[in-house]
Amino acid sequence: MKCVGALGKTMALSLSSRPSLFTSSIRNTFYSFPIRQFSTSLFVLYPSKNCSSTRNKLLRCHSNSFSTHAVATDSSEAPAAADERTNGDAPVEKIVLPTNESSDTLLRVRHTCAHVMAMAVQKLYPNAKVTIGPWIENGFYYDFDMEPLTDRDLKRIKKEMDRIISRNLPLVREEVSRDEAQRRIMAINEPYKVEILESIKEEPITIYHIGNEWWDLCAGPHVETTGKINKKAVELESVAGAYWRGDVKKPMLQRIYGTAWENEDQLKAYLHFKEEAKRRDHRRLGQDLDLFSIQDEAGGGLVFWHPKGAIIRHIIEDTWKKIHMERGYDLLYTPHVAKADLWKISGHLDFYKENMFDQMEIEEELYQLRPMNCPYHVLVYKRHLHSYRDFPIRVAELGTVYRYELSGSLHGLFRVRGFTQDDAHIFCLEDRIKDEIRGVLDLTEEILQQFGFDKYEVNLSTRPEKAVGDDEIWEKATSALKDALEDKGWSYQIDDGGGAFYGPKIDLKIEDALGRKWQCSTIQVDFNLPQRFDITYVDSNQERKRPIMIHRAVLGSLERFFGVLIENYAGDFPLWLSPIQARVLPVTDAQLQYCNEVGKKLKASGIRVEVCSGERLPKLIRNAEKQKIPLMAVVGPKEVETQTVTVRSRFAGELGNMSIDEFISRTKNASENRTFL
């Protein structure tokens, strides 16, 4: 197959408003975003409607996909009825998946399952040494020092777990002295437990027994007996290597992951969810759709944006810049490196060094790749003295930063070593904090809605125990954040004491099509950097005062946000965002010249188009479906004669025969208005 690209210039987008000192926790400040944070609540499984019948069989749908839709819900909601219907035909099944936080029973089941699994492993493999086995978001795991395991071994372990569960053995809590615990550990030769015991500071030491056959150091909680576990709601998922204590210099262990639920329906719903998440995995789709890659020759965690991915990034950046300029921000571009002294002033070298790359020496001076953009924006502010009349000052930058991450923690676009943040900083007066925060909330909503995200979880984090700034300014800033959220009409949760040491903050998680929540946007009031860099302004009394500095990001990291976009849409981007909006397909090579003429007209009109040939038409159509192209324009002898095209939309089915001008007009209108054609 031969495809000739004709990527037109990106058309103008319609962007109207839409309905203490540093501590070890500094990793969570200065826009350090977690890989992914999501929770599963209510989601709906339903089969998609069949592709409509077609007059032209060459344009029939080549795939019947099973789609999953996610709906946010409070975890306290009861399960919805299982026989609701979508579009009047296909049955819809709604299952509420509880979380460890919402269900104490589920947490106890998962924690007990970890112990039952460890007991089963040591019955089958007596030489296996146990380490730790916690519950996790969707289940549990346990690490063992033992021979490598296979999928077949997991089946054996699961059968042994089922036998233990069926025996309804009691779980008995026992308190012992530290010396007694050590004596028992030494008696059964469990060296890792000795190290764990040394790390436990509380007294007394608690042990949990399964019957009188197996025990583990543990603080609980657990179910009363193994029979409280529904063995049909438990599954062992995978085995992976994991270094003891996460240290590559220590032994490689076998980590067995499992999932556990309260009943079989929940397990089935989770497995459906897991399969759908796998289908949407941005790493696989990134390769299949040729969007990006991470090249071993260049190094781990460094992203290569391929032409199609780069087009989407270009659209994201254009959207972001246009909205920011409309909202009164000035755009900045700042260096990727700076003298190491800058990072001493900001505090990063003292308290963030483990996340920074090594320094480089240039002409007997030390330079540092930037891990953050904020010190640069402070330097721009400091270039001259400001008056109170100058405020607010808003600056924004799509700034690439570099952070050292262990190779084992790298994960596609979600955890990388070089990424671009949509940073912005606002310098304002104390009495304008609320207005500026409200403006950021409006801007955040507008940008996120452009990309299809309109459900959020909002958290307001207040003053931690160790913080800079006096009580009065903290109270004023925190009240301003609350007032802005209430003025906006957004519900929010308070994370008491969870603020950064330098100021209170608002964090916003967006919900994707599967109901997963991803932390993207953050708004942070900063009392620290203005003090460290000694930035001031002249007030109405000609006195020097210190301005308030607000950090904020909407998308977080472009790389990470792109990964979320890919998974949200399963790579099936809407027309306005799709890297290739249309493919022109000839029935035979006899129509190729006319197809090229059509492609040129579409390109000249700003439509991103490819002309593909060299295969039989059914295969060209299948290839376009696999590549998730929104529009196909098929050209046969009749279309050449009438100077038309026959159009099929991935989202709306067959659109019939139309003139080139009509096709261009409808495509541009749909793209500009964020609708389907």
Image (cartoon, rainbow, N blue to C red):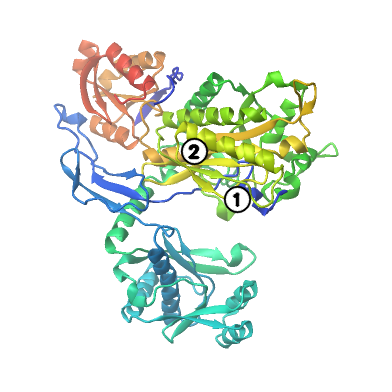
136 or 619: nearer the eye? Answer: 136
**Is the residue 603 above or below the residue 444 in the image?**
above
Position of 58 with respect to 70 (left or right) is left
Give residue 551's position: percent from left, percent from top: 62, 35
Quarter of the rendering containing residue 576: top left
**Residue 310 seen from this side:** no
Point out the image quarter for the C terminus.
Answer: top left
Q: Residues within 10 Å of mark 2 (few under 14, many from 20)?
A: many
Seen from this angle, which residue lies furthest right?
364
421 or 345: nearer the eye? Answer: 345
The amino acid beneath tag 2 is Phe
Residue at numbered disc 1 = 497
**Is the residue 145 above or below the residue 546 in the image?**
below
Residue at numbered disc 2 = 561
**Is the residue 146 above or below the residue 283 in the image?**
below
Quarter of the rendering containing residue 644: top left
Quarter of the rendering containing residue 460: top right
Give residue 373's position: percent from left, percent from top: 66, 35
Secondary structure under the numbered disc 2 in the rendered image: helix
Give residue 254's position: percent from left, percent from top: 50, 69
Give residue 424's position: percent from left, percent from top: 61, 30
Q: Residues within 10 Å of mark 1 (few under 14, many from 20)?
A: some
Position of 495 with respect to 457 (left or right) is right
Secondary structure under the numbered disc 1 in the rendered image: loop
